Amino acid sequence: MPQQTPRRRAARKPPEQRAAEIRATARELALADGLSAMTLRAVAQQAGVTPALVAHYEPSMEALTAETFAVIVREEIADVKAAVAALAAPTERVGYVLHTLLDGSRDEVTAVWVDAWSLGRRMDLLARAVREQTDAWQQLLRDLIVAGRDAGEFVTDDPDSVAWLVLGMIDGLNAHALVHYRDARARGLVMSRAVESELGLPRSALSKPPPSKPPVTP
């Protein structure tokens, strides 16, 4: 009877370091293969540890999935906030947000969102995280719209609803992009025209990328 190669035990590490490594591995796995790929075994294999060790640090895979989703979205929001802060004009800021979210450069995060919407139907913790991060995105957009209105560039008496509408369109068009429905230019044009109309901007004010892409934090 052939001898089985004994499993190598993972090197002992401080609990905080091991927990951080497992969460970082979950994040990498979610971005590469989607939230649905985040099984106990998959995380353990990617991290090079046993499933029992993952379960020790993360006893609830649902909680780990929800937190992983939230971490990914919070990182993207922070990245976008840092980028728009480098732009002076409100119209430029909104234009940057539309282009960076629709140009395909953030498709990995879009795929995570799509997974979260689907899995969240049966995972209460994930559904809560989706609602919280949707609120965070809506607040970011609302703040940009209010700043533009106060500066006299935008015309709207309901920035909250406009922000929600813009967010819903971004989500829908990005979902279309994942299955290659229409092309990026057509999707961007539809988005720009809708937002221009909602904000009282002249046609084509948002249809071109900002003149200079702001620096993005690593």
Image: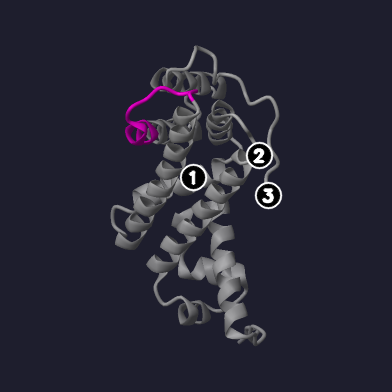
Residue position for label 1:
111
Question: Where does the image place residue 39, in percent across and percent down from the top left?
Answer: 46, 65
Q: Which residues are magenta?
A: 152-164
Of 127 and 52, nearer the camera is: 127
State the CA–CA distance, disc 2 to disc 1. Answer: 28 Å
Q: Quadrant of the N terminus?
A: bottom right
Q: Which tag, 3 or 2, sits closer to the chain's start?
A: 2
- The part of the image, by quadrant, that contains residue 83 is top right
Secondary structure category for the residue under label 3: loop
- Above or below, 218 against 18 in this view is above
Residue position for label 3:
217
Report how many numbered discs are placed on residues in the image. Answer: 3
Residue at (32, 60) in percent of width and height: 123
Residue position for label 2:
86
In the rendered image, residue 156 lying in the magenta stretch gets the answer yes
- Above or below, 86 against 70 in this view is above
Secondary structure category for the residue under label 1: helix
Query: How many other residues sit within 10 Å of disc 1, few (<14), some (14-19) or many (≥20)?
Result: many
